[in-house]
Image (spheres, grey):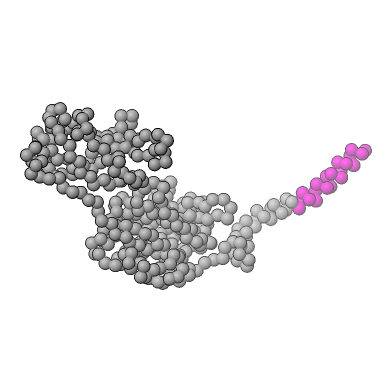
Amino acid sequence: GSEPEHNFTSREQMKERCLDLNPEFYQVVELPAKFPMNSRLKIQLYDKPFETTERIGLLDRFIGECAVNTELRALKGFAKGRQEWFTLFHPEYATSRGKILLRIDVLTEDEARIFKAEELSGPQYAEYEFRLVLWQTVGVRFPEEKDINKDVDQKLRVTINFSGAPGRDCIKDTDVAWYAAGGRAEWNYRMVFPVKLPMNPEHARVKFSLWDENLVGSAENVGEAVLNLAPFFGRTLQEKTSQTKLKPLWVRFTHPNYQGIRLGQLYVEASIVTKAFAEEHPVGEAQNEPNRLPFLPNPKRNAPPWALGSRALEAFANYRNTIFCIAAVILIAAICIPIVAVALFATTQT
């Protein structure tokens, strides 16, 4: 119905704008209804604008809605206390605009007086620190067969987004392993990330990207791997210890354009510690101090191409035939052009 007692909005209660693609509300709403006049329950979801844009008159943006026949549920005796997913639709779009999890109980007046609505509350989050160690890569190669014998100047990139909110990716890069012969490189590299548990299992993952670094131009993506952390985080909540370790494992790199081609593996291990443990036993990124739990020795590295006395000349040696040809052309041009010019000048004089 259109009467005020038949409508409810949580707009004024949303003090902060939620940037999560999977927001949580945990809100109880009680509405009076008379059948058949009030048999249709409609739930609409809106995107509230930022406070600064709201001041200039920007309205809430309609996302989608779902409708429920409450009279039918009462007649068929739907079980009370059951949670259900409902799909949100928009009249201007043919596809789903998302889903909403609801619990809809239809009570008579007598039942409503006897059974009071339950108070809902969200999960109690605990702060942790996620510690990731990258040990080594093996078997790394370029995807294309023509480049299979070339060494990859390896660089690793780690991306996480435990909140799932757009634009909230946390990205960290390693140093570069120049001239990683045979596709093998040591890393001994630690990365540390804050995390709150519990979290949406869909967000509990870490992405590894393998890049070939270039002196000139942008780096080339070689492959990617994704590690699902949901079981590990779930075990952390069950064990309730100050430190939980993930057994070291290999993750394989793949490329969507080169299915079935082995592009190498990365050996990693991880642990998650409580905030109190992290404050009492801090660790540094990479091999920085405090370097412990575990201790990470500096990896063996070839000097970069610009370093004096390094393998820079060796890099140019791969193109020596091209360099010799260019030098020869320049030398011949330097000799021949003056001779031809003199000959032409003499011809014009005669």
| Residue under the point 44% across and 65% down | 285
Image quadrant containing the C terminus:
top right
**Residue 263 in view:** no
The relative height of residue 286 versus residue 333 in the rendered view (above or below) is below
Residue 265, how many percent across, how many down? 40, 59
Residue 59: quadrant of the picture? top left
The relative height of residue 297 versus residue 324 in the rendered view (above or below) is below
Residue nearest the viewer, comparing 269 with 136: 269
| Residue under the point 39% across and 38% down | 54
Q: Which residues are magenta?
A: 331-350
Q: Would residue 115 appear left or right of 309 to someone viewing this image? A: left
The relative height of residue 281 versus residue 233 in the rendered view (above or below) is below
Residue 46, how many percent across, how many down? 32, 37
Predominant SS of the magenta segment: helix
Residue 158, how many percent across, how many down? 42, 56
Residue most extreme to the top: 37
Residue 272: quadrant of the picture? bottom left
Q: Is residue 343 magenta?
A: yes
Q: Would residue 26 appear left or right of 336 to someone viewing this image? A: left
Residue 318: quadrant of the picture? bottom right
Marker count (numbered): 0
| Residue under the point 33% across and 61% down | 128
Image quadrant containing the N terminus:
top left
Residue 132, how many percent across, how many down? 38, 62
**Residue 57 in view:** yes
| Residue under the point 30% across and 67% down | 243
The relative height of residue 65 versus residue 286 in the rendered view (above or below) is above
Q: Would residue 103 appear left or right of 344 to someone viewing this image? A: left
Residue nearest the viewer, comparing 77 with 208: 77
Q: Is residue 48 magenta?
A: no
Residue nearest the viewer, comparing 303 with 88: 88
